[in-house]
Amino acid sequence: MKHKPIKLKDLDGFTVLRAVKEDTELRYDILLDSLGKERIPACSPRIGVILEAVVIFISVSEKPKILSDEPFYESAEVLRWVSLNWELILKHWNKEISDREVLNLLRSL
């Protein structure tokens, strides 16, 4: 299923954790969903990539996919980072580790 990019200003009401580009060594900040599996309505595990004023969603798996038709610069690097951290992000999504733990354990490229 393709998702339309969400404008950053429209993320009100979402509980997100921000992994900053200085820590991930990516070009963009990454949003992790703090509600994860408890989100209502439920959705599959995903992260958000902040591109200026919009957020592009990416699936969380060993082989992640961009969940919109919106291309972005260095998307291959972001997909590689998700592949590197997908098990950890999934543990966070499933509430097996806390926000603080996931930020401390995320690996950079």
Image: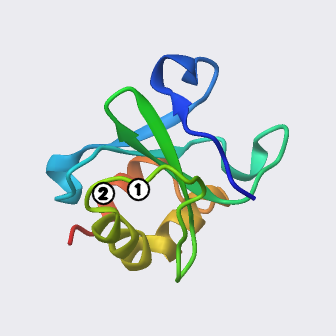
Q: Residue at x 49, y 17 (%)?
A: 9
Q: Are marks 2 and 1 in contact (CB under 8 Å)?
A: yes
Q: Position of residue 29 (x, y in %)?
A: 30, 43
Query: Is the C terminus in the top left, top right, bottom left or bottom right quadrant?
Result: bottom left
Q: Residue at x 52, y 53 (%)?
A: 47
**Looking at the rendered structure, which numbered label has been put on residue 101?**
1
Above or below for 8 versus 34 = above
Answer with the quarter of the image where residue 101 lies.
bottom left
Q: Secondary structure at mark 2?
A: helix
Q: Position of residue 21 (x, y in %)?
A: 21, 48
Return the residue nearer the eye: 91 or 65. Answer: 65
Q: Residue at x 41, y 72 (%)?
A: 85
The residue wearing badge 2 is: 104
Q: Position of residue 64 (x, y in %)?
A: 53, 73
> Residue type at mark 2?
Asn
Q: By what rule are the colours in the image chosen?
A: rainbow
Distance between mark 2 and mark 1 Cα atoms: 5 Å
Q: Is residue 87 left or right of residue 50?
A: right
Give the total number of marks visible in the rendering.
2
Q: Residue at x 85, y 39 (%)?
A: 41
